[in-house]
Image (spheres, grey):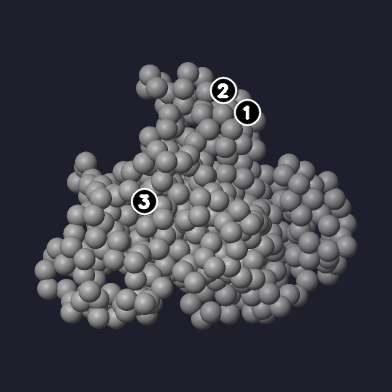
Amino acid sequence: MLYTPKVRSTTALIAALATVTSALAPLTLSAPASAQASFSDVQGNWAQSCIGSLTQQGIISGYPDGTFRPSAPVTRSEFASMVGKAFPNVARSRSAVQFVDVASNYWAYSAITTATQTGFLSGYPGNVFNPAQNIPRAQVLVALASGLNYAPSQPAMNTLSASFSDAGAIPAYAQTGIAAATEKRLVVNYPNVSLLNPNQLASRAEVSAFLCQSLAGTGQTASTISIQYIAGATQSQPSQAQGNQVLAGTSIAVRYASAQRIIVSPNETAPVALTVAQDVRNNQGTVVIPAGSQVIGQLQPAQGGSQFVANQLIVNGRQITFNASSSIITETRDVRDPNFGTILGGAALGSAASAVIQGVTGDRVISGQTTVLGTVLGSAIGANQNRNLGKTIRDAAIGAALGAGVAGITGNRTITPQKVTTGAAAGATLGGILDRTGNSKVVVINPDSDLTLTVNSSATL
């Protein structure tokens, strides 16, 4: 747990907590930036382009073994080194401080001195800097807003509440700085753009993303971060429909009418029909996609979690090819958790998730509100009150098979990986839905907050 000493004044508190890090100090001795532009552990990473760009500029570097370690935390010393390289021309507005825990021969001594003089970082009471301390995301963003002299143009909580579902978790000291950073498009939230996680330790990939956006904001580079992960970015784009088009980057709020939650296995593909929750208008204010329109697609495996990918939009009965996707939901729950049962009521279970629950917990029962997703688009099979889950799964398999035009799954027969049933509409597979499994992890999705869509390709309506 990160310990932050008490600071005696508001100004000192903001300054002290505006401290962050990420640059990989001793690692700059490993290899030239150009040689490290491609790391063995960032291929396919959501921040890969950003990491490569910063490496080429000599702002960050990797480890001697050729890795970057994108999930590793960042220290205050590392961040001091990084911001010094990213913003070498920022004016020094403060006097130098001799920190009692930063010796003159310390590798980051010069970087820390510069970062504190330029306003990116500050120390703690007693001239303490804590150079090895890992930094939360909130402090990273406050530091960047402070060093770049950004201030919000709107009331801070208005911006924060509109942008983040967990705005209430943002510490008081950080609200103004994070609001300014949000307005300047510095905030990058992966995989859920609306979830800030302000008190979570910042990873090397996350700090890299914040810096890439900061550099883009000052005009030094082009943005290398996907727009769907930049907080507030879709609000500044022509994110409304234009004319008879819905432009790439448009954010579309959706809901799932059949259940409060959707539970799938991390390796499962499940077809789902979502409903557009709010009208989407063009620049003239005309509704182009009315609330109540359907978005057809599927939940599919992505980076150990699940992501909704849309392929069709139905507006006033017309079917339109549509390319949009949600953020990746990576949070999983263990069905063996004693508290897991409380989320089953009102949930829609993917067939593989049903198999996981049955395989791990045995003759578990599910409530009358629970439905089991079939493989045919938009369909769901209700489970009777206190009905044995194993029988429900079997009947779900039968319904799915009939929908796909496959017959013969009756009685005690099971579907195994060798007897794959494919849904006619989405091509989802039900491998082993009746087979016992040792895997006890499932992905729990809250449609209202997790499945907000970003249009990937402009669509003509």
Label 3 sits on residue: 87
The answer to whether one can see residue 317 in this image is no
* Residue identified by numbered label 2: 461
The label nearer to you, 3 versus 2, is 3
Residue ID at (25%, 76%) = 99
- Name the one closer to the observer, 202 or 131: 131
Upstream in sequence: badge 2 or badge 1: 1
Query: Residue at the location (22% across, 74% down)?
Result: 98
Quadrant of the frame with the C terminus: top right
Q: Residue at x 67, y 44 (%)?
A: 377
- Of helix, strand and loop, which one carries label 1? strand
Which secondary structure, mark 2?
A: loop
- Residue at 58% x, 79% y: name it: 336
- What residue is pinned by disc 1? 320
Disc 2 residue crowd, few under 14, some 14–19, many 20+, Cα 10 Å: some
Q: Position of residue 395 (x, y in %)?
A: 73, 61
Tag 3: residue type?
Answer: Phe
* Quadrant (top left, top right, bottom left, bottom right) of the N terminus: bottom left
Where is residue 211? Give x, y as percent: 42, 53
